[in-house]
Amino acid sequence: MTSSTPAAPAATDTPIPPVLAEVVRSGFVEGHHRGSLVVLAADGSVELALGDVAGPVYPRSANKPMQAAAVLRAGLELSGERLALAAASHSGETFHLDLVRKMLAELGVAEADLRTPPDLPYDPQEAEHYLAAGHVRDRVTMNCSGKHAAMIAACARNGWPVESYLAPEHPLQQLTLRVVEEASGERVGHVGTDGCGAPLMAISLTGLARAFRGFVLAEPGTPERRVADAMRAHPEYVAGTRRPDTWLMREVPGVLSKMGAEAVQAVALPDGRALAFKIDDGAMRATGPVLARGLELLGVESPVVARIAETPLLGGGERVGEIRAAF
């Protein structure tokens, strides 16, 4: 005789990530965002670990400083705003698009060579203005276009194939993999494809925080330090005028900050303290409160921390709640 009782779900050893943020509406907690976070002390030791900080994750665009360092190692000469844009997830503001097009002309790269998918500006306000002006999705407008321009130029400089510059086995991408492994201090756990089409290299959150720490502490003039210095000197080109990365690097001296899609964030202070986190469900709305709380744990005291944390919930067009850190 067959029992009608449903079988129990198979046991799993995968731990449930801790709650990093909670969604509060009208005084009622209506949801949670789980994830993992690591904080490194100035000497590089792990000061706080929440969730899985040793398993591989896709850092997404938080890997861009390492990708920019790779094009420098490949011999491409970039500095200032142009180097910051090579490490950027730009908002698609006019000054971003103007500089991307200038870079393409200066580096001898045709827009048609870009393998970025046609897209609207990353910033919602900029996307509205762009569409209202009658424009359509474009490869230059995609937020990774500065990075791709630099990659293509590095390939041309070395006589490497341009048409296959995004292939994981391409010499530039193999160099990038070595940079990621050296910076993180660990082997890449998996290679996939990022939203822009570039190879995406998985490392742990601890490795990601270690990489950012290494960039700010690197010797002046090294590719890693040049990238960190360019990003910190020109933060508006790394993100945009309405973005937390820009606010943080502009208002807290010496901070290096870069977000990644699917709610990834990495930050390093000039003394070597660092953090990295990922929200498990990829909810970008949770990154501000979690980042602000992480900055508090790092001892950052600045009005920008409260600004970053501000994530209101609306009801009927009025504020009725917030998303707040839960650790």
Image: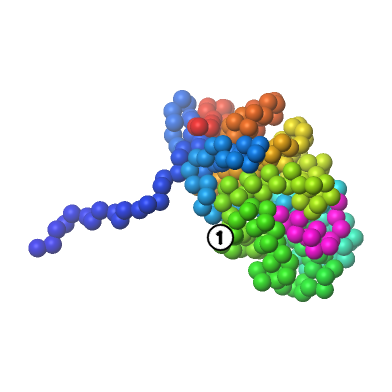
Q: Which residues are magenta?
A: 66-79
Q: Position of residue 41 (x, y in %)?
A: 62, 36
- Residue drawn at x 41%, y 47% is 15
- Residue lying farthest right? 106
Verify whether residue 70 appears in magenta.
yes
Residue 77: x percent and y percent? 87, 58
- Is the residue 297 above or below the residue 126 in the image? above
Q: How many marks?
A: 1
Counting from the top left corner in percent of width and height, residue 184 is at 64, 52
Q: How are the colours assigned in the image?
A: rainbow
Secondary structure under tag 1 reads loop
Q: Is residue 10 magenta?
A: no
Residue 22's x, y, as percent?
A: 49, 34
Task: Please tell me in which quadrant of the rendered image residue 323 appears.
Answer: top right
Residue to which mark 1 is pinned: 189
Vertical side of 105 occupied by 256: above or below = above
The kind of residue on which mark 1 rests is Gly
Q: Is residue 81 left or right of residue 89?
A: right
Q: On screen, 106 above or below 62?
A: below
Specify whether residue 12 is in view: yes
